[in-house]
Image: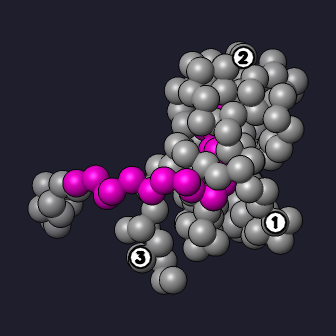
Amino acid sequence: MNVLEAVRKRRSIRNFLERDIPEEVVAALIDSLIWAPSAGNLQSRRFYMVKEKRLRKELAAGALNQNFIRDAPLVTVCCTDSRIGRRYGRRGVELYTIQDVSVSIMCMMLTAEEKGLGTCWVGAFDEAEISRVLDLPAHHRPVALVPVGYPSHIPAPTSRLPADEVVEFR
């Protein structure tokens, strides 16, 4: 599968099979997270890979009861690391760290697609509750949850705006 094919094929998956993800596939997901580009190569991001069912259930509750999170065999809690981002001052902490996490997530999601896995970028959650559930240090801010697993249902593609409405050449 080439990259553009993976981009076009990827969907937000909210229904997962009860099937574990092999460790070598999890390792590939982790590899894609850490090899993503980052501002100044500071890598101001941290990821928590949650497999434990009790914790997944608590994460789902902290994410406004989005129970598909609980049902995924793996949930990646994606965090900024403000200690690292401080090199660039306020902009580094408030923007670059989020960009670092975001590009890592996309790399992981494309790797997951290549491996036959489904993912869903979840931004609707109570940050304080997610931090409490995982006992995160204060400098790790959760910005996204990404449940990962084998899809039991793949939705049809959604429409996209035409290029001339979203891209301008100057």
Q: Quadrant of residue 130?
A: top right
Quickly name the residue at label 2: 129
Badge 2 amino acid: Glu
- In this rendering, would 4 be left or right of 24? left
Badge 3 amino acid: Leu
- The mark found on residue 22 in the picture is 1
Relative height, residue 138 to residue 110 (above, below):
above
Relative height, residue 62 to residue 121 (above, below):
above
* SS for dot 1: loop
Distance Cα–Cα, label 1 vs label 2: 29 Å
In this view, the residue in front, 149 or 37, is: 149
Quickly name the residue at label 3: 4
Distance Cα–Cα, label 3 vs label 2: 36 Å
Q: Write down the region rendered in magenta.
A: 140-159
- The mark found on residue 63 in the picture is none
How many neighbours does mark 2 have within 10 angstroms: few (below 14), some (14-19), or many (20 or more)? some
Q: Earlier in the sequence, mark 3 or mark 1?
A: 3
